[in-house]
Amino acid sequence: MGLPNLQGRDIKRVTADNAALEYALGLIKACAARGGGSFRENPANSLHWWCPSEQDMWETGEWSEKWYSACAFQGARCKHQLLRHNLPEIDAWPVLQCHHIHADNEWKPYTCNDRHVYPSHEEAEYTASLALSLAITCSWWAARKGLAVLKIHRLPPVEVAGDWRLWLELDPRAARQWQMIPFALQCGIRPPDMEQLPVRVEAASVELVEGIPPDGTFFLRLGG
């Protein structure tokens, strides 16, 4: 893959990228041959999907595609993405195509604190919502295959409609690294060095002393 007549630094970069791609796809094929599951992701219009090795893998009929809009997973901008995978659990996701209202200039570069900001750079990092959705879905697959026994967590909510224009004013970290702690707490995980934060546990797992729970334990009553 690469434009003809490349020279010098350009041809070295393309050659290195092609070698890395072949290596990664080779690992994925070997994993699938052992009965393993995997997914790979790129923009829907990426040239990656047209490389010969990727085309050969697709033609085997062993892979499925899930098209989605990044804004469905709390991204601020409409970005069409594609997951190619062999996990039926990903196919069970709902339709994730954008029906939001987006600003016409959402991809226009802008200046902030005397520096140029390119929206494509902000949106390159996956949102916490997408990362957690993939992690939970892979856990479902592992449990179904008998490779793991684990508590199955609920997927984060996704939203494909609504007015997304004001999302451009949010700090990009709000949907990414800043959201990792709330998601960890939702899954019952206490992040390192944050022992003071509460964490969800099952009531049955709390040890009572003479009918009294440990200090700092709170029970929520659900239902009537």
Image (cartoon, rainbow, N blue to C red):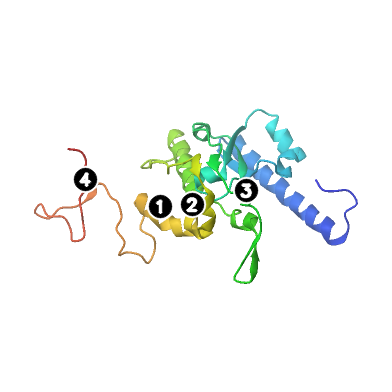
Determine the CA span between mark 2 and mark 3: 25 Å
Query: Residue 105 at x, y = what percent?
Result: 63, 52
Q: Amino acid at mark 3?
A: Asp
- Quadrant of image for the C terminus: top left
Viewer-side residue, 120 vs 124: 120
Q: CA distance from mark 4 to mark 2?
A: 30 Å
Label 4 belongs to which residue?
A: 204
What is the C-alpha distance between the residues marked 2 and 1?
A: 8 Å
Residue that numbered label 1 is attached to: 183
Q: Nearer the viewer, mark 3 or mark 1?
A: 3
Q: Quadrant of residue 55?
A: top right
The residue where tag 2 is placed is 128
Residue visible at 10% across and 52% down in the picture: 211
| Amino acid at pointer 4 | Ala
Q: Give, as a three-letter code, the residue at label 2.
A: Ala
Instruction: Identify the amino acid type marked 1.
Output: Phe
Q: Which residue does the image show at 43% across and 42% down from the upper left?
A: 157
Label whose residue precedes the other's in the sequence (3 or 4)? 3
Q: Earlier in the sequence, mark 4 or mark 2?
A: 2
Residue at which label 3 appears = 104
